[in-house]
Image: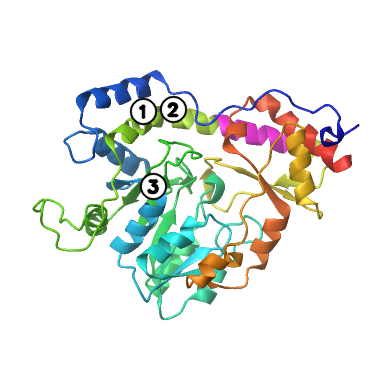
Amino acid sequence: MTLAIHGGAPVRTAPWPSWPPPVDDAQRKLVTDVLESGLWGATQGGSVVSDLTAAFAALSGVPYGVAVGNATLGLFAALRGLGVGPGDEVVIPAYTFVASATSVLLTGATPVIVDVDPVDLHLSTAAVEAAITSRTTAVMPVHLAGSPADMDPINDLAADYGLVVVEDAAQAHGATYRGRPIGGLGDAGVYSFQASKAMTAGEGGLIVCREESAYEAIWSVCNLGRKLGGQWYGHPTVGWNLRLTEIQAALLLPWLDRLEAELDRREAFCAALERELAATGLPVGLVPQPPGTTRDSRHLLMLRFDTPIDRSFLLSAMAAEGVPLDSGYPPLGTMSALTEAGARAEPCPATRAASESVVWVRQSMLMDDPARASDIAEALAKVLQG
C-alpha cells in the first residue's frame, strides 16, 4: 500500500474536532452579561472571577484560590508567595514545558532540572533526592499530559527535607490521585487556561492552596503587594498586577459543568486506541499512568515506540495520512537559553530516551468518536509497515 506521503490515498480525510470546542449557551450568556455590565476588570466589583476561584478551589479540595493572567505567572506567584527567591533552588522535571523552568527564573531562584521515571515519564523522586543541596527550597512535580504525578513519595520527601511543593497542574484539570483531586496535594497548585488546555479562555491561570497564610501571601504577589483587606494604596510588600479578567472568567466558569463529560469522552477514546494498538501487534503502546492514578484528565496521549524510529519521517508520514502527531518535549536541560540563565541540569537519560521514542496525540483528536481511534492505529500500521 502506497503511503500518502508518496502519493497514495490517506487513511483519513475527515477533519479532527477543533479546539477549543464551540462556545455553549451558558458561556455566551455569561460573557454577554459581563460585557453589558461594564465590570470587566477583576477589581471593579464583578463576581465571576471570585466564583471561578471558589469553584476551582473546591475542585481541588482546598479553600483558597487566586486567578491570574497565565499559568507561568501562577507558578511564579505561588513560588514567590511561599518564600522562594534569589539564592534558592527549585527541582523540576526535565520532560515538561519550558515554563516550569522560566517561572522559577522569574523568582530569581535556580531551576534544577532532573530526570523522570523511565516508565511513566513523571518526576523521579530518586532524582529529586539526589539533586537536593543546602539551597533547595522547593520541588515542582508536573501532572504531565493530564496524569497525576505520584505525589505521596514526593510529599514525603519534601517533608523530610523541609521543601515547599508546588504542583504544576497546567494540563490536569479534574485529575485525581488515590481518590484525591490534584492541585490541592502540595502547598500550592497551578492550572492553565491557555488555548490548548482542557479549559481555556485563550490565556489564563489559577492558583489553589490549603493554608490561609500561603493564600494571603500569594494574593499579595498577584495584587501589587497589597495586604488582603488592607488599604487600596497600601503596598507593604512588592507585588505585581497578575490578575485574570471577568471576561476570561466568564468563558471558564460554565465550562466546569461539562468538564467531567469531556474527560469521559477522552478516556473512552484512549481506551479504544489502546485496544486497537494491541490488536495490531505494532511495537507501540501507551505510556502508562503513574502509580495512584484514579482519574486521568487525558490532556494528551503519549505513545512510546519500543523499537528505534525515524521520528521526522514518522511525523511527516502520519500527517500525510491525515493523522497529525506531535513530537513532544525536548529535554529541558538541552535548552541553552535555560542553562545560560543559570539553570542546573542533572543527567537525564530517561528524558533523552523519551524525546527519541515518544510522540503525542493531541487533545482535540481525543475528543473524536472513540470508534475513530482505529484511524490512528491504521495509519501507524501503514507507516510502520510501509
Dot 1, crowdedness within 10 Å: few (<14), some or many (≥20)? Answer: some
274 relative position to 90: left or right: right
Note whether 137 is above or below 366 in the view shown: below
- Magenta segment boundaries in residue numbering: 265-275
Q: Earlier in the sequence, mark 2 or mark 3?
A: 3
Q: Nearer the viewer, mark 1 or mark 3?
A: 3
Mark 2 in CB contact with mark 3 (< 8 angstroms): no
* Label ID, residue 70: 3
Picture quarter with the C terminus = top right
Viewer-closest of 156 and 369? 369
Tell me the amino acid under the disc marked 1.
Answer: Pro
In depth, the one of 59 and 40 nearer the eye is 40
User: Residue flagged by tag 3: what amino acid is it?
Assistant: Asn
Does residue 69 appear in this view? yes
Residue at image point 64% right, 49% down: 288
Which residue is at the far bottom? Answer: 134
> To which residue does mark 2 refer?
258
Q: For this view, does 310 lie left or right of residue 153?
A: right
The colour mode here is rainbow
Res 41 → quadrant: top left
Residue type pointed to by label 2? Arg
Q: Residues within 10 Å of mark 3 (few under 14, many from 20)?
A: many
Q: CA distance from mark 1 to mark 3?
A: 19 Å
Residue 40, x across and y down, in percent: 24, 33
Marks 2 and 3 sit apart, C-alpha to C-alpha, by: 22 Å
Q: Which residue is mark 1?
A: 254
Q: Nearer the viewer, residue 78 or 18?
A: 18
Residue drawn at 63 percent across, 32 percent down: 269
